[in-house]
Amino acid sequence: MAVNLATVAKQKKIKYFLISFVDLFGVLRSKLVPARAIGEMQRDGAGFAGFAAWLDMTPAHPDLFAVPDPASLIQLPWKPEVAWLAGDLVMDGKPVQASPRVALKSQIASAAKEGMRLKTGVECEYFLVSPDGMSIADASDTQEKPCYDQSALMRRYDVISEICDCMIALGWNPYQNDHEDANGQFEMNWDYDDALVTADRHVFFKYMVKSIAEKHGLRATFMPKPFLNLTGNGCHAHVSVWDKSGKKNLFISKSDKLGLSKMAYKFLGGVLHSADTLAAIFNPTVNSYKRIDAQVTSSGATWSPNAITYGGNNRTHMVRVPDVGRFEMRLMDGAVNPYLLQAGILAAGLDGVANDRDPGKPSSLNMYTEGHKATGVRRLPSNLLDAIRLFEKSKVLRATLGNELVDSYAKLKHQDWRSYSAAISQWERDNTLDC
């Protein structure tokens, strides 16, 4: 039975709805709709001009509508008279294929046809910084190895606990919060779920963290590499595939050394096969490539991958297998679009299963110190331009994500790169002003 949002508004005393969508650059766009109008919006969607967001559209395009998904509804714990809704983009009565949530739902449908259901969890790292973003917010957070530092964690108890309390109230089942490897950096973990649920929660989590940080006079950033000498913000994804009912994990094997089934290895083979072409969406900004294969940080390790490899419970690889029945992909960073993250994993994994892609043998090397010993290993792209070029040439991603999304994303990202290239940096002034 369909959920009637007008009825929900009365039951839960909701005065306003944020009907939202995420554009190709990961920007959260919304309209604030009074409860009196939610019935019409549920039927027809909230109207937007596509050109005004990062979508490959012009002012001549027809109206764009975000049709809210009632299943995504989240009542803001810190402002319960407002509820958030994820919307699916529609134009001229048809889904916009080159939009992130629609793209993910398309991949989920493809998986369902094969009797497969992707479940994921994400680890969203972020910094708490000064309002101007120039320094970490806690001047006392200075340890060389600050990871798990109890004192630094508890100095931010008011912020961390409020975010965690919100997740508890929302039923996300958060289970741990910690100070991460960089000064001023934190991570908060909640239960894994179906890919679309995780993506919606990922979108809302970023909004929630930023909102609550602002309440406390701070600023939260998921920027991949905000400080040169500190570990960057990753967004690791834990991946497993279940049967259509969601009750049986198809990745588990009791006889395999790493606890992965034959199908899991094929899925992993697809992820490894397309990893370099997926970097453009998993690492979507110029700044992303300052995190990948970065210089050694003050803590002694970057915790980011530098090549396309996998291993057991070994964090120096792009993919590690920490436990039976799942693997962790460590390539994505804090700027990743939550919907394209999930869509990219599914697209590559389904290709791997369909084409029996072999991931090869796992490696036990320490890739940070022994990477030179790895033979036949492909490197990740070293900048956004190289990543975009690989992405737009990928036959796998064109066949799975579709030409419309690939072309639109590549076009906008090329514009992004040209804008960056035209900017004159302080480094250029410092090093070439007197040439």
Image (cartoon, rainbow, N blue to C red):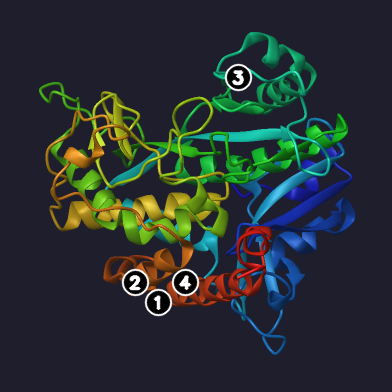
Q: Quadrant of residue 43?
A: bottom right
- Three-letter amino acid code at disc 2? Arg
User: On the rendered structure, is 395 left or right of 186?
Assistant: left
Residue hosting label 4: 405
Residue hosting label 3: 177
Say few, some or many: other residues with alpha carbon within 10 Å of mark 4 (under 14 / 14 to 19 / 20 or more). many
Callout 4–callout 1 Cβ contact below 8 Å: yes
Q: Is residue 10 above or below residue 162?
A: below
Q: Earlier in the sequence, mark 2 or mark 4?
A: 2
Q: At which x and y percent is residue 87? A: 65, 58
Callout 2–callout 4 Cβ contact below 8 Å: no
Tell me how far mark 3 sits from mark 1, CA to CA: 40 Å
Callout 3–callout 1 Cβ contact below 8 Å: no
Tell me how far mark 4 sits from mark 1, CA to CA: 6 Å
Disc 3 on helix, strand or loop? strand
Q: Is residue 184 above or below residue 396?
A: above
Disc 2 on helix, strand or loop? helix
Tell me how far mark 1 sits from mark 2, CA to CA: 5 Å
User: On the rendered structure, is 324 left or right of 8?
Assistant: left
Q: At which x and y percent is residue 2? A: 62, 50
Q: Earlier in the sequence, mark 3 or mark 1?
A: 3
Residue hosting label 2: 398
Query: Which residue is pictured at 78% across the width and 30% down the height?
Result: 77
Tell me the number on the disc at residue 403. 1
User: On the rendered structure, is 240 left or right of 4?
Assistant: left
